Amino acid sequence: MFYIKLFILIFLTIISSHTYALPSGMTVLSDIPYGKDVDQALDVYIPADAKDAPVIFMIHGGAWSGGDKANKPEFENKIAHWVTQGFIFISTNYRTLPKIRPLEQAKDVEAALLFSQKSVREWGGSPEKFILMGHSSGAHLVSLVSSNYNTIMGNGIMPWLGTISLDISGYDIVKKVTGPNPSEFYKEKFGESPNYWKKASPFHVLTDKIPPFLAICSLRSDDACTQAENFIAKAKNLGTHVEILPVDLSHREINSELGKGSCYTNYVDDFLKKLNPSIESILTRTSNGKNTVGCFTPFTL
């Protein structure tokens, strides 16, 4: 009986995660391994007739201990918006707690990025047109990778165009666990070592200019925008082109709503347009005159 219930649970999980009717002309390559562990795999969504396409490289959230690349909030609206316009979208898994800790998870992200850049021409994409994107703990990981930009360039990874961080309060782990209201949640995830906290903090790792960076944060969070503002201010002082977008959406909605027709998606498109002339051409051609004028109250650092 136990094994029957287990089989049903696994079957239902697979169905709920992977059953999805792709938009016309789009193909998906599922569960491509970039490492030896079963969790080191990625899905690639490819538009019709892709050639030298820009690439959105997505890292899912899940509190460093869960989540999955094939959960619909990670890809559904994003591929409907960007892949239909000519982007390749890569949704990436990585090993999570308790298998490995957050610093090692960032190494998985680096390995997946290196593999994807080496393989992307086979899928019709350009290794020179990658945009990193992550939500929640995935936002922490792409922010940490970005903060280590100059270090990991020596590991064979090619420069990427920019990074989009979708709502994370943990730019500064040290402050999360030693501030006025220390977070037991972050201590559980990042342990008790101050040295580890610092190495796992994008804010503290950041010491030099990095690729353009967009931090999106929820106005409904206690400190997500404060943490994002501090990180962005430091990156700006180091010469990085930075933007911060506070939105009145929940933590989950910041991920799931991205790609829907909205001022929010339009703003992200405007950021993408600044990264590369070919991206600007793609998004301008398909935008039908949409822009962000009047959508948001300007946020000044």
Image (cartoon, helix red, strand yellow):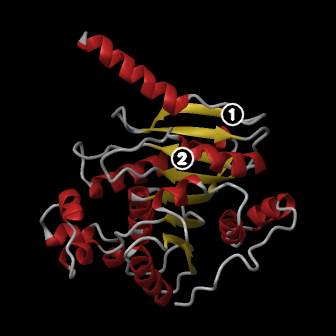
* Location of residue 230 by image quarter: bottom left
Q: Amino acid at mark 1?
A: Leu
Residue designated by label 2: 73
Rendering quarter of residue 136: bottom left
* Nearest the eye: 75 or 132: 75
Give coordinates of residue 168: x percent, y percent.
Answer: 41, 66
The image position of residue 214, as x and y in percent, is 55, 72
Q: Which one is nearer the viewer's eye here, 61 or 100?
A: 61
- How far across and how far down the image is residue 6, in percent? 31, 18
In the rendered image, which quarter is residue 286 located in?
A: bottom right
- For image coordinates 64% across by 83% down, the residue present is 297
Please, what is the three-letter code of the amino acid marked with disc 2? Answer: Pro
* Neighbours of disc 1 within 10 Å: few (<14), some (14-19), many (20+): few
- Residue at label 1? 22
Q: Quick one: label 2, few (<14), some, or many (20+) residues within 10 Å?
A: some
Image height of 165 relative to 83, above or below: below
> Residue 229: x and y, percent?
45, 82
Q: Is residue 175 left or right of residue 116?
A: left
Instruction: Note whether 177 is above or below 230 in the view shown.
Output: above
Mark 2 and mark 1 lie on one chain; the one further toward the N terminus is: 1
**Residue 14 versus residue 117: which sits nearer the camera?**
14
At mark 2, the secondary structure is helix
Tell me the SS state at disc 1. Answer: loop
